Structures are given as structure tokens and as C-alpha cells.
Amino acid sequence: MHETVEPLINDEYTGGPPTKRVLARLQEKRKEGRKVAGVYCGYAPTELILAMGISPATLCAFSNGTIEAAETVLPANLCPLIKSSYGFIITDTCPFYGLADAVIGETTCDGKKKMFELITDLKPTWIMDLPQVPDQEEAITHWTAMIRKLQGFLETTFGARATDDGIEDSIRDINRRNAMMREVFEFAALRPAIVDWREMYDLTFLAQGSSGKDMEPVLSEALKKLAKRRDDGYSYGPAGAPRVMVTGCPVGGDAEKVFAIIEEAGGVIVALDACSGFKPYMTDTAEGTGDPVRALAERYLKIPCSCMTPNARRLTEMTRLIEKFRPDAVIDVVLQACHSFNIESHKVGEHVEKVHGLPFLKIVTDFSLGDVEQIRTRVEALLESC
Amino acid sequence: MRAAGLDIGSRTVKLVVIEGGETVLTRKDLTSHDPLEAARALMSGVEYDVIVATGYGRHLLKGHLDCPVISEIKAFALGAKAIQTSCRVVLDIGGQDTKVISLNEGGEMSKFEMNDKCAAGTGRFLEIMAYALGYTLEEFPKAALSAERSEKINSMCTVFAESEVISLTAKGAARSEVALGIHRAIVSRSTALVRRIAPSGEVFFAGGVALNRCVEALLAEDLKRPVFVPPDPQMVGAFGAALHADRSIMKGTSHA
Ligand code: SF4
Ligand code: SF4
């Protein structure tokens, strides 16, 4: 930042990894006697978990450091996110896992599914069977049943309860949270940019397992600061810097090297189109349907994850984002050995280039630093063409 | 005004100086373990007004000379376009990576792809295989071209391919036929990349491996498309960087 402005979240964790802030908040919740459920994926129904008085905690999955340990059991040629998660667990270094009373997983990709089998004995673990042709009526019925079963699991494990009215309230609360997040994104879409991607990431990470009520003060403050930045004519990043939208697999921790490279190459990151970014906040759950769990099932099956087929929503959502954020280039980050995102990248690239006429780059990477220079060359070449 | 372009590659460093659109100096040397020192040695005594660096070591130079840098992709696109104005597809096989760049009508890069995760299918691969077969780099393509048929090499991993070569020769396979197999393996890797990025048109073939006549011939045969090798294929990137430097003087700015 060439001018100093007050960070959107300004606390003792500002500037450090966003995990620390979330951990502190969870520890507080724990002290208040709340139970914690570890989650790995965007399909875990936050509204239900919160309605049952349980706090969801995103488990660690983004460090290169735990991969070596994981590879004593898992094959090397596996998605680093899965290896890292597993490594964290067997080396007992994920504080969120330590806090968690139970773990919720979903059958998204084969790697995760089979990795879960290796950890089910360690803690009460519940795997939700995710249908993968999401637009069929049977898929919604099935996912509704799976959410009910999860509710049953949480009831027996924690003695927790939620009425349908309670779930409905939670839906409304999370919808409010998401709406506020989208207000923040409106500011992130401004041209020139006024937000650092790290600030966006701090917010998206914190909001993930938080209720609307908990996020309200943080987000109102952030919105005030953003309005001020806009009114003061503040801008982030070099003048005329190409605007970059990053899409693809979740990115965090050691994979943030890609974000750093984009900035070093002179770009400014304006949109994070991944589960680690804006995705969880883009759609709302229908309110007042009389069947809140079915409403949740419908909402969650709309997540445009590459494990779904066909996943046309990824492209329609992307168009929405491109129109709003007006990027000059799109970068698709694919984690090594993530077949679904890797294959889907072909369609994504064609969509970006042909429909939107924007330069596109796919980067396949892992959490190590070995390929930084190769990525740099590609990113520089992409931005030179903007 | 003399504009210089320096291309610090993984295997070789290249320097081109142009003046009034004409190349007035070209130099190259091995990168060695100390690319910065290699670049310095190459530049010693050379006069220029402005310099632009490219190649994998470009940022190294940037730190020491405070000169602008451009990516190899841009450098090759600029260089190739200036050498052959009709150029739309560039294939560069260097010491450690392979890249394919497609250019639009205006000569700007429109798409590119690189293979650089390992030495598979690059100059380094050829070098190691030549060595494993007991050929020098000069003899290697000649031997391959003399073969009537080729042994199939299944692995593209440098380490596995090397053991494959050793076991083939141990089984009594003709050296020249194994050599042809190696060349075919490299070519099929590169043509897959070319087809993906640029499905038609003449291919401008640059980089150190473009000096290899057998690769050139097999490329044309496999792609069924004309292949053009410029007179000094290793200098295309440095030439492109020099052109960029030259243009930035004209634009009154030396910023990349
Ligand atoms: S990308 Fe897919 S599998 Fe990964 S967290 Fe998001 S929804 Fe889950
Ligand atoms: S990035 Fe891909 S392979 Fe890795 S966990 Fe997510 S869906 Fe699975």
C-alpha cells in the first residue's frame, strides 16, 4: 500500500495469518461451553451447525510443512490440500482439529473421501454423501436427507438440538452475513481498487464459520472504512495495474505464493473466486419455505464446485463476477493432482477467452516454493499481454 | 542509440546489441553455476545505452543493474515477429523448458503454454540421452537421422528414459535407432503442445534445440506443417529483449 490506511480488520492479528484470529475466537466460544465441529469443505451446512449451538472450524490444509509426514502414508501424487490436512492431523499440529469435538466431511473428490477413511477412528467423524449431478430432483431429496442425518449425528454426539424454526433463524442470520459480505465485495469491485487481497482474505476466512451476529460489528466497521477510502479517493496498488481475478481450487497459506507473485508482477487481485474466497457468500438460502433443511440442500447444491457435473454454474457465476469486478485477466489456480479442477480449466479458459475476451492462464501448483520462478514467468507474460 | 538484450537462460546466457534496427553484436556463453557472473563476463566491454533482460535469470540482473525485464514469452514473441513478419506460432525448446507461443495478426502474444516442471523433452534431456549413448551433441542428431527405424522410448522422465536407453542398448538395440527414438520422444512432446496452442500454420522454431536437424525434420513430419528455423535460433530471446529496449527508447521510457 503506498498510502497508509487503517486495515479493514484492525486488531492484534492484523498482518499475521488469519487463522490466529479465528482460533482466538473459537477458543472463546469453547470457554463459553460451545462445541466445535471441524469442517473441510464449502458443502458443510454452516446454518445447521450453528443452529445446533455448535461452532464450525475450518481445519488446516494449506501448509507445505505437514506434507512430508503425510507422505509416509499417502501417495506423493495427491492433491497438496489433502496431504497437508492429513499431515496436520497425524502430526497433531492443527489447533482447530485439536479443538474440534467432531469432524464433518463430504464425498467431494476421491482423494478426500479416501483420506477421511484414515482419520475416522481418531475423532467422531461424519461423512455426508454428496450427490454430484446436482440439478436432479433426486439430488436435492438425497442431500436434504444427508443434512438431516448430519443433524442426527450432531444430536447423538453432542446432545445438541435444533428445531426447524431455529434452523430457519440461522438461515436468515447467514443470509444477512452473506449480504453484508457482498456489500464489501461491491467496494472490492471499484476501479481503481481500494482493497488489498489480504484484507479480503481476512474477512472471507473469518466469516466462514461465523454467524451473521458475530460478523455484524466487524463488517459494519469494514464497510465504514471502505466508504471512507472511496470518498477519500484512495487507491490500492500501482496506478493502471492490471486487475486480476483468481479462480479455481481453494488457496491459502503456502499457496498464497501465487497471489504474491501476481502482485510482484505488477497486478492487483480484485476477485477471489474460490471456496477460500467469495464463493461461500455469493448465494443465499430461500427463507420462509416451511422446509428449511430442503432450502439448505438446494442452496448448497448450487455451489459451483468442480466435483459436480455438469458444472455450468461455475461459468455463469464467473460471468457475474467478471461483469462486476471487470478484471483484465483471469488466473485459474489448480492444485497438483486435482483432476476435476484441472480438467474443468479447459472450459473455464475457453469461457474467459471467447465469451469475455480476456487473457487466461492456468497454473498447476502445490504448496512448495520450487516452482515460484516458473509461475512468475507465466504470470509476467500474462500481464504483459493485458 | 545502442540497445542491448540479455537472455539469461538455464543453460546459456545470450547477449544481442542492436543499433538502427541492425544487429551489431551477438555473444553467448554457458550459464554455469553463477548466472550473474556469466552475465557480467558476457557484457564486459560491451557498450550500450539501454538494456533489457529476459530469461529465467532476468530478475537476478534486475536487482544488480536496475534494468527493466520482460518475460521470455514476450521476448521470443518480439524476436520471432521481427525475424519473420508472417510468424504466428513460436516453438522454443531451450535447456530446461519448452514453450509454445501463438501470435495474433498484430504480432502480439495471444496464448502460450510452457512445459517446465522437469527436463523432460528439453535440451537437457537430449544432452543426457546423447551422453548415455556415448554421442557428442553434434553426432547425436546425425546418428539419429542415419537410422532406418527407431526404438520406442516409453518414458519421458529423464531419469527413467536414461535407464530405458541403457537397457535397450544392453539388449543389443542399435545405438542409432535408440537415438532416433529419443528424438521422436522429444518431438511428440513438443507437437502436442503446439497443437494445443496453435492448431495450424508454419512453426517458427527457436532455442538451442532448434540447432538439432533431426528434431527439426521430425517436427515438420509429425505436424505436417512447415517449420522455419532462423539463422541463429538461440539468440531470438535476447534479440527480442534488445528490440524491446530499442522501442522503449523511442517511446521515451525505459520501463518495461
Ligand atoms: S472446492 Fe469443492 S471440494 Fe473444495 S472446499 Fe470448495 S466445495 Fe469443497
Ligand atoms: S483441490 Fe481438488 S483434489 Fe484437492 S481437495 Fe479440493 S477437490 Fe479435492
Image (spheres, rainbow, N blue to C red):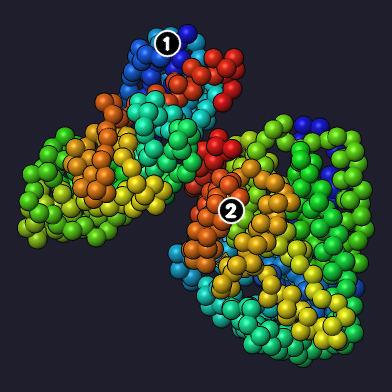
Judged from the image, the secondary structure of the residue bearing numbered disc 1 is loop
To which chain does the residue with label 2 belong? A
Q: Pick whichever, B20 or A33, lies toward us.
A: B20
Identify the residue shown where x is 41% and y is 14%. B21
- Residue in view at x 47 percent, y 32 percent: B106
Q: In this view, does B106 lie to the left or right of B141?
A: right
Q: x and y percent of residue A318 in the render?
A: 65, 58
Amino acid at the residue labelled 1:
Gly
In the rendered view, tell whether residue A324 sits above or below residue B234. below
Which residue is labeled 2 in the image? A355
**What element does badge 2 sit on?**
helix
x%, y% of residue B166? Answer: 17, 55
Direction from residue A221 to residue B2 in the image, left or right: left
- Residue A73 on image: x %, y %: 48, 71
Residue A134 visible in the displayed image: yes
Dot 2 amino acid type: Val
Q: Which mark is residue A175?
A: none
**The quadrant where residue A296 appears:** bottom right
Same chain, marks 1 and 2? no
Q: Counting other residues with Cα less than 10 Å from the Cα at mark 2, is it few (<14), some (14-19), or many (20 or more)?
A: few
The span from disc 1 to disc 2 (Cα, nearest Å) is 42 Å
| Res A334 seen here | no
What residue is pinned by disc 1? B20
